[in-house]
C-alpha cells in the first residue's frame, strides 16, 4: 500500500501489511459484483453509485473497526460489511436508522417470502393521522388511508427485525411514488396531472400500488441480508458529536453547504418518513406553521445546515477523530472549499490524499465533482 506523505510516497511497514491480511477483503472483481446486488435507492445524496470508486480508494487501508458517521442510506456501511469490517452505523434521523437495522441485519427472519407478502396484502386502510393531516399534499386520499393502516400494522409487529424490514420496504415505496423522491413540497399535482410536459418522472412506477412497491423492496433487501463475519453495530440516532472516538477508520459524509449558504435539509426532505417511524408521536413533532407539516427543527440536524457553524463543526469532528484514519466524502464547490479542507487535513494528518471523481446526481443536469479526503497519522 502507498500513501501520499505531503507530496511523498510512503510504503506501509511489514506489521501493517500483516494487519491487513488478518481481515482479508473480497477480491476487487468479486466486490464489484457484490455492490451491483445492493438495493438501489432514490434517496437524495446516496453514495450507492459511487461505492465501487470508494471501495477501490479504501481497500488497501489498514483498518478493521469503522464508523459510518452520517450513515444515510447505509450503502457505505453495506460496503464495509461486505469487506468484512466491524461496522458501526450512525445517522441523525430515526428513519435512516430503522432502514439500516434492516439492511445490515445478519439473517432474514422470514421462513419464506409468502409470509411477508401475506402481511402486506392484509394491510387495511384506516382514517388516521396521515389522512387527517396530509390530504392532497403527497399522496391521494385513498393512498393516505392505506398508509395509516400500514403504519399502524407495522408498529404492531413484535419481531424487531421483521418490523424494520417492513418499514424499509414502506420507505422505499413512499420515495418511488413521489416526484423528485422528496417531501420538501406539497406537489401531488405533478404526479397526477397527465397534461403537463415534464422531463422527469416514471408513470409506470407512480401508478403501482404501495403493496406492489413494498413487495419489490422486499425482493431487493433479500439480496443483502447475510451473516456478517464481524459485529455490526447500529448506534442510536442523534448527535454525531456525542460519539466516542477510537475507531480504526471514520467515514464522514455530512450534508453539503453551498458557498451561497444554502444547505441540504434532510429533515425537511424526509420528514414524512421520519413521521412514519414514530407514528404515535408524529403530531408532537410537527411545526404547526409549516405549510407541508414538516418537523420542528432538531438541533443536531439544523446546526449542520448553518453556514456560520458548519465549518467549525466539521473541523472539530475531524479533530475529535484525528487518531483514526479519517475519510471525508465531499462535493467540489461547497463550503468550506476544497483547499480549506485539504489544508486542515494537512495540519492534522501526516499522510493526506485527495481523490476526485466526476459524477452526476439523479435529476441534476450539471456534472459535479465528488471529493474524497483521506487523512492518517499511522
Image: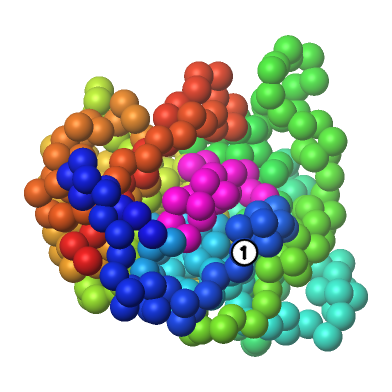
Q: Residue at x 55, y 70 (%)?
A: 25
Residue under numbered circle 1 = 27
Residue 94 horizontal/vertical position (percent): 45, 65
Quick check: 234 left or right of 15? right
Q: Is residue 210 visible?
A: yes
Q: Residue at x 72, y 84 (%)?
A: 109
Taking the spot 65% from the left edge, 86% from the top edge, the residue there is: 159
Q: How many marks?
A: 1
Residues 202 and 152: in front is 202
Q: Does 53 appear in magenta?
A: yes
Please state the extent of the stretch shown in magenta in the rendering.
Answer: 38-59
Residue 351 rendering spot, x and y as whole percentages: 21, 53
Q: Is residue 230 left or right of residue 319?
A: right
Asked which secondary structure carries label 1, the reply is loop
Residue 116 found in image quarter: bottom right
Q: Quadrant of the C terminus?
A: bottom left
**Which coloring applies here?**
rainbow
Residue 296 on the magenta segment: no
Q: Residue at x 77, y 32 (%)?
A: 202
Residue 105 placement: quadrant = bottom right
Amino acid at each position: 500500500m502507498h500513501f501520499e506523505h505531503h507530496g511523498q510516497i510512503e510504503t506501509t511497514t511489514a506489521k501493517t501489511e500483516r494487519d491487513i491480511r488478518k481481515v482479508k477483503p473480497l477480491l476487487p472483481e468479486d466486490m464489484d459484483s457484490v455492490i451491483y446486488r445492493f438495493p438501489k435507492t432514490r434517496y437524495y445524496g446516496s453514495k450507492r453509485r459511487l461505492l465501487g470508486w470508494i471501495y477501490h480508494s479504501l481497500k488497501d487501508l489498514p483498518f478493521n473497526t469503522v464508523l459510518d458517521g452520517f450513515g444515510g442510506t447505509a450503502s457505505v456501511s453495506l460496503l464495509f460489511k461486505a469487506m468484512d469490517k466491524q461496522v458501526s452505523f450512525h445517522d441523525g434521523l430515526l428513519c435512516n436508522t430503522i432502514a439500516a437495522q434492516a439492511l445490515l441485519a445478519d439473517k432474514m427472519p422470514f421462513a419464506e417470502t409468502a409470509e411477508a407478502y401475506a402481511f402486506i396484502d392484509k394491510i387495511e386502510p384506516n382514517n388516521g393521522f396521515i389522512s387527517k393531516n396530509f390530504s392532497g399534499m403527497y399522496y391521494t386520499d385513498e393512498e393516505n388511508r392505506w398508509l395509516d393502516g400500514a403504519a399502524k400494522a407495522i408498529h404492531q409487529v413484535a419481531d424487531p427485525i421483521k418490523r424494520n424490514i417492513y418499514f424499509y420496504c414502506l420507505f422505499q415505496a413512499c420515495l418511488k411514488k413521489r416526484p423528485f423522491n422528496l417531501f420538501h413540497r406539497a406537489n401531488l399535482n405533478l404526479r397526477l396531472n397527465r397534461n403537463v410536459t415534464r422531463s422527469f418522472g416514471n408513470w409506470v412506477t407512480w401508478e403501482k400500488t404501495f403493496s406492489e412497491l413494498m413487495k419489490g423492496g422486499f425482493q431487493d433487501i433479500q439480496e443483502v441480508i447475510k451473516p456478517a463475519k464481524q459485529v455490526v453495530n447500529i448506534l442510536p440516532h442523534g448527535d454525531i458529536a456525542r460519539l466516542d472516538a477510537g475507531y480504526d477508520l471514520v467515514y464522514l459524509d455530512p450534508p453539503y453547504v453551498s458557498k451561497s449558504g444554502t444547505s441540504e435539509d434532510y429533515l425537511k426532505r424526509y420528514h414524512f418518513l421520519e413521521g412514519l417511524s414514530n407514528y404515535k408521536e408524529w403530531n408532537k413533532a410537527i411545526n404547526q406553521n409549516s405549510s407541508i407539516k414538516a418537523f420542528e427543527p432538531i438541533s443536531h440536524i439544523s446546526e449542520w445546515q448553518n453556514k456560520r457553524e458548519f465549518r467549525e463543526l466539521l473541523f472539530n469532528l475531524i479533530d475529535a477523530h484525528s487518531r483514526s484514519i479519517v475519510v471525508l466524502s465531499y462535493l467540489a464547490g461547497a463550503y468550506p472549499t476544497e483547499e480549506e479542507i485539504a489544508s486542515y487535513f494537512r495540519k492534522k494528518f501526516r499522510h493526506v490524499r485527495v481523490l476526485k471523481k466526476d459524477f452526476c446526481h439523479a435529476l441534476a443536469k450539471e456534472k459535479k465533482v465528488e471529493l474524497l479526503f483521506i487523512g492518517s497519522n499511522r
